[in-house]
Amino acid sequence: MTDANAPGRRPPGPLAGVRVLELAGIGPGPFAAMLLADLGADVVRVDRPGGPGLGIDPARDVTNRNKRSVIVDLKDPEGPARVLDLAQRADVLIEGYRPGVAERLGVGPGDCHARNPRLVYGRMTGWGQRGPLADRAGHDIGYIAVTGALGMIGDPDRPPAVPANLLGDYAGGSLYLVVGVLAALHHARATGTGQVVDAAVVDGTAHLSAMIHGMLAAGDWQDRRGANLLDGGCPFYGAYETADGRYMAVGALEERFYEEFVRLLGIEDQTPPRTDVTRWDALREQVAARFRTRTRDEWTAVFEDSDACVAPVLSLREAPHHPHLAARGTFTDHGGITQPAPAPRFSATPTAVRTGPARPGTGTDDVARDWDVPRLLSAPRNPQ
């Protein structure tokens, strides 16, 4: 552990003093709130009785680390008032309901801004707050499908590869919500006026493909899978199986990196010109055949001190033990759970995993005191 994580220290993080109210949900909303909490914000998660239905043990739900939790039943006559009391004292609110649900529950932007005009009200959905599909159910895979992003991933002769929920929910959703919330918070502190941030997974995912659209317009990208420089079509930008059934990732795009790659691979005198696209299939076969002659760890040793841009493809359990990631502390252990450490890093306001996952309702007394919301004390408690 670094000094910032040493026992007894509580690094404030750059968002120290910012109060965030999270209305419990699943997917990108909780991850966005976790990121704000990692950065030092005081995040209070409003859980509902029975939980959000994700099914994971709350003690292991890392997306609830660095937070506190209270339980409020928004369908109870007193529930909305308790949430509005918290919203009055918050800088940011995050919710992930379908459009109109927060309004029907009495905690929509109008209700909250009537109590707190400076509040940044962050809304996280897949389809957005308006549009023909706004009221439809959905999940990450459908959102990235309609943006064209899913169609770019995978082999051309197989169905598109599903990138877990990292591309849509978290990259296109959570990260854009956090960017929007922080921009709106800056505006609110400068003007005294809050606003609504409409973060949609479809918008963020589409935005991530900006460079690809530029290349498409310039004629440098083919609108089909597995035919381009960065989508697996290029034989020196992809993954190859090794003798033990594992994989190596190759990203030797630039000529000098490519030259080192083929030299260390042992095929420098056998390959066709790298710029001859018509012979890429032949080059790919050569590279694949060579990688199959050694194990992943043997190839890792060959390339580890080079600029050939080759790396082993590691599993989730292997990744924390990679020498570089271990040296940087990219992963950390807290409460017996190995997990990614907060990112990015700050020189003056270091971050840390301060507390483990918030158990539903266990922060009620502290939040009622710290946020001066005595009405919380009459809210439901954790039934466990």
Image (cartoon, rainbow, N blue to C red):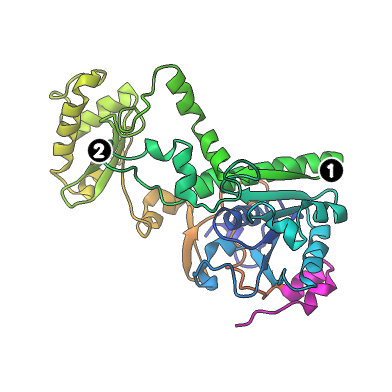
Q: Which mark is residue 233?
A: none
Within the image, what quadrant is residue 10 found in? bottom right
**Label 1 neighbour load within 10 Å: few <14, some 14-19, many 20+:** some
Within the image, what quadrant is residue 372 found in? bottom right
Residue drawn at (85%, 49%), measured in percent from left and top?
117
Q: Is residue 19 magenta?
A: no
Q: Earlier in the sequence, mark 2 or mark 1?
A: 2
**Residue 14 visible in the snapshot:** no
| Secondary element at tag 1 | loop
Q: Is residue 376 magenta?
A: yes
- The residue under label 1 is 193
Q: Count all numbered tags in the image, as a single digit.
A: 2
Alpha carbons under labels 2 and 1: distance apart: 52 Å
Percent x, y of residue 224: 34, 30
- The residue under label 2 is 157
Q: Is residue 78 left or right of residue 95?
A: right
| Front tag of 2 and 1 | 2
Q: Pick whichever, 322 or 165, lies toward us.
A: 165
Of the residues shown, which amino acid type is indicated by label 2?
Asp
Q: Which residues are magenta?
A: 364-384
Of the residues shown, which amino acid type is indicated by label 1?
Thr
| Secondary element at tag 2 | loop
Residue drawn at (49%, 52%), measured in percent from left and top?
139
